[in-house]
Amino acid sequence: MENKDIMDEQSSTNTQQPDNLTTDEAVTINGGEPEAVIEENAADGIVAETAPADNKVGSEIAELKDKYLRLYADFENFRRRTAKEKLDLIGTANEGLLKALIPVVDDFERAVQSMEKTDDVAAVKEGVLLIYNKLVKTLEGKGLKPMVSKGEPFDADLHESVTQFPAPSEDLKGKVIDEIEKGYYLNDKVIRFAKVIVGS
């Protein structure tokens, strides 16, 4: 019993604080800071920590926004420039071919003038053949190649069948026996299908 009473007295003396204690003494007795001081310091710590963090985050956001706007402006300029270059390219795509055809047109004009002054049909034929050969060579130089179809097996990827005739011989069945309109390649790409008659 006595031990219990002594323990109760000690615990009551530990919990009770004298009224005349200062804040520093109260801190020592409680084993820590008083609640008001803790809140005050905590509030100061939050302000001290968040104020520079807010400034840093704000400057990072402003910097990223500036980078984004610059990148967007660069992309818009690039898009406009490439669109303009594309239009220019489309507008002048045939320039090389047309420059190469101008001398052929000049030759035709000279041939027309000479036809009006001469009655020599052989000379006119020869001039027209020369111009034709020049035209063909110019087009071949630009990648245009005629398609060879006559005697070849019918191929729907290359030929357009206009009609079918009975084949003159067994080996021409299913093959092109005549060509109505010549087909053409441009650098190994078919740009015009050959119109043909197929043997049946």
Image (spheres, rainbow, N blue to C red):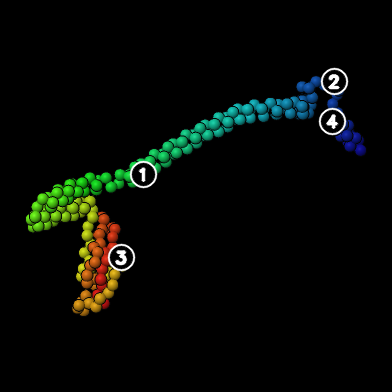
Q: Which mark is residue 20?
A: 2
Q: Is residue 112 above or below residue 65?
A: below
- Which residue is located at x 84 percent, y 30 percent? 15
Of mark 1 and mark 4, the one earlier in the sequence is: 4
What is the number of callouts on the image?
4
- Is the C terminus in the top left, top right, bottom left or bottom right quadrant? bottom left
Question: Which mark is in front, 1 or 4?
Answer: 1
- Residue 179: percent from left, percent from top: 23, 67
Q: Which residue is mark 1?
A: 86
Amino acid carrying mark 3 in the image: Asp
Q: Which residue is mark 3?
A: 157
Question: Which mark is in front, 2 or 4?
Answer: 2
Q: Is residue 130 in sight in this rendering?
A: no
Distance from label 2 to label 4 (Cα)? 15 Å
Question: Which mark is in front, 2 or 3?
Answer: 3
Q: Is there a contact, CB below 8 Å, between mark 1 and mark 4?
A: no
Tag 2's secondary structure? loop
Distance from label 4 to label 3 (Cα)? 103 Å
Nearer to the camera, 140 or 68: 140
Q: Which residue is mark 4?
A: 15
